[in-house]
Amino acid sequence: MERIDRILRNPVFQEHVAKNQAAEAGRCFCRHDMEHFLAVARIGLILNLEENLGISKELIYAAALLHDLGRHRQYLEGIPHEAAGGEIAPIILQECGFAPWERSLIVDAIMRHRDSESSERADLGGLLYRADKLSRPCFCCGVSGECNWKQEKKNLSIRY
């Protein structure tokens, strides 16, 4: 996955990962870091196989690595992080060799990854939505009782 390695080495990607880390330094809830990005990618791969979606591994990893990249802007500027990520991702994707149609699919998935209407879609956007929600280990979280997620949304057992 050469293009995925390019994303990881990309200075713009690294800059935004560092800004997320700084913005979430005191955060006690789930963080939006490499651990989360990789969990979303790996769960996305499993869902892709289980659901026979046929989405390429590179598209799944690219969307997962970039989907929360704008989190720091949400904290600092009040911009929804999916919109901020939708602005950042095309720059990185183009620099890393993704074709225009691939960039379009990935950016659309990023823009919709918080939209509950995406939850049942059999495309990259739906896959990213589901993998993102399933990535949270609420069952072992020490501050789960303080979390603003509704109880029925919390992952209280291991699924993936």
Image (cartoon, rainbow, N blue to C red):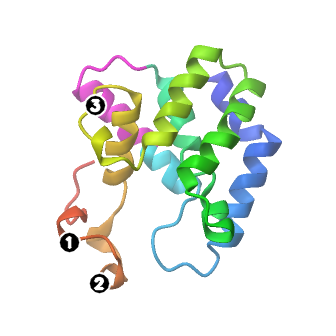
Which quadrant holds residue 103? top right
- The residue that label 3 is drawn on is 121
Q: Position of residue 34 (x, y in %)?
A: 58, 53
Label 2 sits on a secondary structure element that is helix
Amino acid at the residue labelled 2: Gly
Q: Residue furthest right?
A: 11
- The residue that label 1 is drawn on is 151
Amino acid at the residue labelled 1: Gln
**Where does the magenta region start and end?**
41-55
Dot 3 or dot 2, earlier in sequence: 3
Main SS, magenta residues: helix
Label 3 sits on a secondary structure element that is loop
- Residue occupying image coordinates x 35% and y 78%: 147
Q: Is residue 109 left or right of residue 155?
A: right
Q: Tell me the distance, in whole angstroms, between the alpha carbons under discs 1 and 2.
A: 9 Å
- The residue that label 2 is drawn on is 145
Dot 1 or dot 2, earlier in sequence: 2
Q: Tell me the distance, in whole angstroms, between the alpha carbons under discs 1 and 3.
A: 24 Å
Q: Position of residue 128 (x, y in %)?
A: 40, 39
Q: Position of residue 93 (x, y in %)?
A: 68, 29
- Residue occupying image coordinates x 37% and y 53%: 135
Task: Give the class, few, some or many, for how many residues have Cα within 10 Å of label 2's Cα (few <14, many ≥20).
Answer: few
Q: Is residue 82 left or right of residue 129?
A: right
- Residue occupying image coordinates x 44% and y 49%: 39
Which quadrant holds residue 113? top left
User: Viewer-nearest of labels 3 and 2?
Assistant: 3
Q: Nearer the viewer, residue 159 or 29?
A: 29
